[in-house]
Amino acid sequence: MPLVICCNLDLPDGSGMDFLDEVRAVQGDSFVVGMFQMKNPPVRFLLFFILTENNDLTTEYEYRHEGVNDYITSPVNIPELIRRVLFFVE
């Protein structure tokens, strides 16, 4: 089962792309998200979604080119978010 990360574009200590790069660079035996720990998933099973207020098409293109699965602008429509996640899972 894929791991899904929904991340804001702007984070207090960097950007969503910085965080994605750090996740991709994880080489240890486990992957920790909050209080959950799991074996390090292969990158192909990692779904990375950006949730943001920024609807700049250049930024969206840059993130998609770097490997973000989807770029969703606010207001986030929860049924649409679920549909998009399911698209990548199936």
Image (cartoon, grey):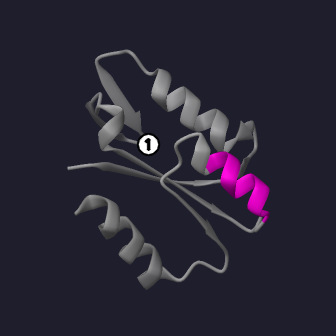
Q: Is residue 52 left or right of residue 29?
A: right
Q: At 44% across and 42% down in the image, what residue appears?
A: 34
Q: At 67% across and 75% down in the image, what residue appears?
A: 74
Regarding mark 1 in the picture, which secondary structure is present there? loop
Judge whether residue 59 is colored magenta: yes
Query: Residue 17, position in %: x, y?
Result: 64, 39
Q: Is residue 23 above or below residue 80?
A: above
In the rendered structure, which segment of residues is drawn in magenta? 56-63
Q: At 28% across and 17% down in the image, what residue appears?
A: 29
Foreground residue among 3 and 33: 3
Query: Residue 68, position in %: x, y?
Result: 53, 48
Q: At 74% across and 37% down in the image, what residue appears?
A: 14
Q: Say which residue label 1 marks.
A: 34
Determine which quarter of the picture holds residue 45.
top left
Q: Is residue 89 left or right of residue 7?
A: left
Q: Amino acid at mark 1?
A: Gly
Q: Report how many numbered discs are placed on residues in the image.
A: 1
Q: Is residue 90 left or right of residue 88?
A: left
Q: Is residue 81 above or below residue 40?
A: below
Query: Residue 90, position in %: x, y?
Result: 22, 63
The single residue placed furthest to the top in the displayed view is 28
Judge whether residue 62 is colored magenta: yes
Q: Main secondary structure of the magenta part?
A: helix
Determine which quarter of the picture holds residue 71.
bottom right
Q: Residues within 10 Å of mark 1 (few under 14, many from 20)?
A: few
Query: Residue 81, position in %: x, y?
Result: 46, 74
Foreground residue among 52 and 64: 64
